[in-house]
Amino acid sequence: DYLKNIRNFSIIAHIDHGKSTLADRLIEKTGLVQSRDMKEQYLDNMDIERERGITIKLQTTRLHYKAGDGEEYILNLIDTPGHVDFNYEVSRSLAACDGAVLVVDATQGVEAQTLGNVYLALDEDLEILPVLNKMDLDSARPDEAKEEIEDIIGIDAEDAPLISAKTGMGIDDMLEKLVQVIPPPQGDPNGRLKGLIFDSYYDSYKGVVIYTRIFDGSVKKGDFIQLMNTGKSYEVTEVGYCIPGMVPSKELKAGEVGYVCASIKRVADARVGDTITHTDKPTDKPLKGYKKAQSMVYCGVYPAEGEKYENIKDALEKLQVNDAAFQFEPENSAALGFGYRCGFLGLLHMDVIVERLEREFGLDVITTLPSVIYKVIMADGTERMIQNPTNLPDPAEISRIEEPIVKAEIMTPKDYVGSIMTLCQSRRGNMTHMEYLTETRVLLTYDIPLNEVIYDFFDALKSRTRGYASLDYEFQEYRPAKLVKLDILLNKEVIDAFSSIVPEEEAYAKGRNICAKLKKIIPMHQFEVPIQAAVGRKIIARETVRAYRKDVIAKCYGGDISRKKKLLEKQKEGKKRMRQFGTVEVPQEAFTEVLKFD
Ligand code: GTP
């Protein structure tokens, strides 16, 4: 019975509590990768991820561990992404596990994301092993942290291993506990094939590589498999284990974790959460929990001055091959010309994609104001989903507009409760619950429009609480709101790329604010540039960028050619990220600056 020696688990933690460091230590102790080869953290392998210090893409690693009972165990460590934008992906990788190691930083205690992730794990009925990390630090307070785990999460933490992922202290003890506490997988290797896709990525040689946990049956090269939610069939070209790195094997059977390749062209065809089965002898029901990727935030991506539209299209296509959650379609802006409307899971996802366009593909792009999707109920009763504020129908034809509301959980030391409440109120938040988790820690629950959360809410929260508060949120429902379209006009022309949908009572203040900001950002022209904000046909704010007196060059005395050259070059440099709107030039930063609240 091979099953009793397998353990499938994840490490869950709040950001920075030491998940990646612990994974490294485990690989070093039990994996085939030698520690001297471990110059880099093994699991987070994308540059941008590493720079931002967050895990986005999932990876899995097969470890060998010889336990105190003399038995050799196979430990499949399944990594989970560390950001709320990717909660669905997290939940699917947890569904592939039988248990989870909960890492709590003993100097910090339980934080909001710790909770969010634990709830996801409990939803999947996982056995949870709490461990207290960073015990090498003097500021570690293991007893307090244990108490928090017990009080707040409600799991027994008395025997939680005390470890330091950094020094390696306590790791052996942890591994012993892990094989005792986390149950072996169950499943029937002779049953009909049922495997869960918990991650996939595109490889230019093998096509899509599916990471899967097999629940029943087995799969091998040459089999025809069907992806139950898309209904498509493929011939398996290779199966194997992730050691890490792909190592082919004869088959993958019930209880095991590994990879499957089947010449699949796009990751969107092998979406996380889908079930693989055999085409000729399918299982009767797919695994539960499959969800289609749902974009929450949209923005326009346009070529900057001098950039080619085709290059952007190519790059977006390449990115999509590897990211099932990223969507795009062509769109046309009166101001920006041809471009794409792109859909993202959240703002972090958007930042990562835009950064990749710039860095990996060397493109110069302009992104428009991000927007959530509004639901518009027309006077005739029909419904429309609006991803681009410009497309908001004429108010006269609209019966009501609804916006997405999220449930936000904010955990904070009690001293900051007042200033967090002020912040949430200013973002149209509605407190639904407040709970003292311990004497000093408070959990605030808010209903808050997604639109208010996506911009700089997290930054504002951090700066008001000196970094101590943590945030977790999830989509809840659409609710009616009094919203209007706020247009911005430059030199009397509406610039569609600047339009936004805002609460009616804030339109005036927002309009004034945006005009004032644009006045600072838009450079002087040879003519006066009026900047106006309007709701419908009504102008609600106005600023003016005054005209130059003389040409810049005229300011250079006499024939100082090199100085002139420098000045021209500087202007050119400054122009790189400019966009022409009719006769007015606008720098790219305008799009990001106008968004920021103060
Ligand atoms: P995400 O990938 O963002 O989810 O973070 P993470 O939870 O993986 O945290 P990571 O392993 O990157 O560790 C965060 C920081 O804590 C790093 O600077 C680590 O070096 C440090 N760290 C991790 N474990 C320990 C420990 O046991 N002791 C000490 N002193 N520092 C640690």
Image: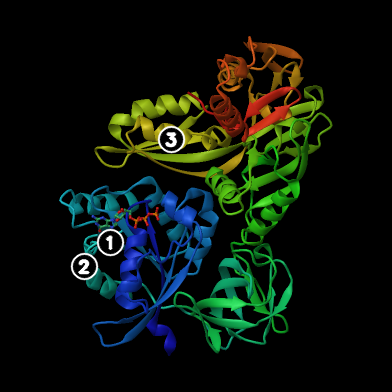
The reply to whether residue 127 is visible in this rendering is yes
Q: Which residue is mark 1?
A: 131
Label 1: which secondary element: strand
Q: Amino acid at mark 3?
A: Asp
* Residue named by callout 2: 170
Q: Earlier in the sequence, mark 3 or mark 2?
A: 2
Q: Are marks 3 and 1 in contact (CB under 8 Å)?
A: no
The residue at which mark 3 appears reads as 459
Instruction: Quadrant for residue 104, please give it.
Output: bottom left
Instruction: Choose top left, top right, bottom left or bottom right for residue 568.
Output: top right
Look at the numbered discs 1 and 2 and tell me whether their residues touch, using CB distance below 8 Å: yes
Q: Amino acid at mark 2?
A: Gly
Query: Gap in Å between the C-alphas at discs 1 and 2?
Result: 10 Å
- Image quadrant, ligand 1: bottom left
Nearer the observer, disc 1 or disc 2?
2
Rendered location of residue 388, percent (x, y): 71, 36
Q: Amino acid at mark 1?
A: Val
Residue displayed at 63% across by 38% down:
372
Q: Nearer the viewer, residue 19 or 283?
A: 19
State the mark number for residue 64.
Answer: none
Examine the rendered structure and indicate whether residue 565 appears above or below residue 360: above
415 over 330 or under it: above or below: above
Percent across and percent down for residue 495 are 72, 25
Instruction: Using the image, determine if residue 493 lies above or below residue 200.
Output: above
Q: Residue at x 55, y 43 (%)?
A: 347
Residue 79 position within the rendered picture, expressed as x and y whole percent measured from the top left: 44, 64
What is the CA distance from the residue labelled 3 to the residue labelled 1?
Answer: 29 Å
Within 10 Å of disc 3 (Cα), the crowding (few <14, some 14-19, many 20+) is: few
From the viewer's perspective, is 86 left or right of 290? left
Q: Quadrant of the N terminus?
A: bottom left
